[in-house]
Amino acid sequence: MATLLRHGASRVSSASSSWRGSWTGTSFKSFSRSLFVEATTEEQVSLRHLSGAEEGVAVLTLNRPDARNAIGVELLKQLRDVLEAIQLDTSARALLVCSSVPGVFCAGADLKERRNMGVAEAQRFVNTLRSTFSSLEVLSMPTIAVVEGAALGGGMELALACDIRVCGDKAVFGLPETGLAIIPGAGGTQRLPRLVGRPRAKELIFTGRRIDAEHAEEIGLVNHRVQAGTAYKKALDIGCEIIKQGPLAVKLAKVAIERGSEVDSASGMVIEEACYAQVLQSKDRLEGLDAFAEKRKPTYHGH
Ligand code: COA
């Protein structure tokens, strides 16, 4: 089961949850949810909350070493549970998505499981994977993928669903699905062209080619390429910069960018105006102005 660790305290697993995420302003609806406490051994996805100067940063970690973090039914279920929990957790203001498996971020869909699935089951799985990554994309806090090693197929799609990508210089990216006579099915055909442009995305998807970290940086697939083994530190630095900003402002900036980029520019301006109207009402805005006048650091509360 997915395990949620909070300052090293008790373990809480979430289960029996069915849910959906949607942009409704900044709200995310969840329902039919039950939580229970359980000691577990089979932990493929975990969530930690950092403390001290890093308080506000949460770290989601994939941990299925034997299958190189391949996404099977159990890992997907745990990922959904953790995403549901984090969306409801107002203390998490930036999320790092990492792997505990050396040399691999995520090997994509579990191809061994897939082989034993019928058409209907495979379709259900892919649809769930797609909606889970969409739920990650619409989380209210910024998300940063920390890629060391291979991010292939669904693994690359997982990174694409994050707001920011940081990789080590031994990282490898690829959408090899056409080589398996399928297409990327967890958002890859949609997010990759939006990120790197249609011609580049088409070439990568039509050929199934794997690219190295340098190429990924060149085409804008990653925000930062750093020395292998230091991607987590770089991502954490970014997370720590984010948590110093006004929480509501960061949240609404994400909404404005995400929603605005799906519509024409004039409509995007209307979305920006609506988001701005919400920050205008906040106490944090007044605190920002006071702190500036008093030459001190602001203390924000997210409202
Ligand atoms: N699904 C199921 N099992 C997978 C897997 C996947 N996507 N990727 C790796 N594994 C399994 C391997 O079958 C192997 O299992 P085994 O020990 O029972 O033989 C184990 O993980 C280790 O894999 P291996 O290839 O030896 O590890 P590696 O560290 O040398 O290479 C990768 C890691 C990720 C580069 C390599 O495993 C790979 O290319 N995987 C396929 C990725 C892919 O095509 N994904 C697209 C899905 S659409």
Image (tube, helix red, strand yellow):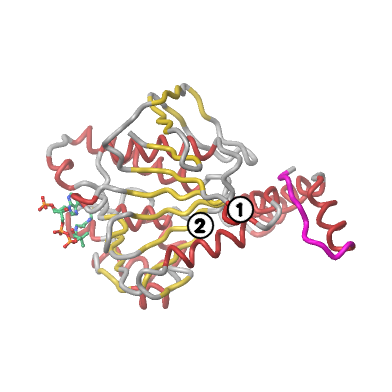
Give the percent coordinates (x, y) of residue 27. Answer: 61, 37
Q: In this rendering, would 67 be left or right of 57?
A: left
Magenta stretch holds residue 119: no
Query: Residue 213 lies in what quarter of the image?
Result: bottom left
Q: Amino acid at mark 1?
A: Lys
Of residues 35 and 203, the one drawn nearer to the viewer in this rendering = 35
Please report whichever mark, 2 or 1, sits nearer to the chain's N-terminal start: 2
Which residue is drawn at the image coordinates 25% and 47% (left, top)? Answer: 64
Q: In the rendered structure, which segment of residues is drawn in magenta?
A: 294-302
Q: Secondary structure at mark 1?
A: helix
Quarter occupied by the C terminus: top right
Of residues 40 and 160, the one drawn nearer to the viewer in this rendering = 40
Quarter occupied by the N terminus: top left
Within 10 Å of disc 1 (Cα), the crowding (few <14, some 14-19, many 20+) is many
Give the percent coordinates (x, y) of residue 38. Answer: 36, 26
Q: Disc 1 designates what residue?
A: 254
Q: Disc 2 designates what residue?
A: 163
Q: In this rendering, would 238 be left or right of 195?
A: right
Q: Are marks 2 and 1 in contact (CB under 8 Å)?
A: yes
The residues tagged by marks 2 and 1 sit, at their Cα atoms, a distance apart of: 9 Å
Above or below — where is 39 with respect to 190?
A: above
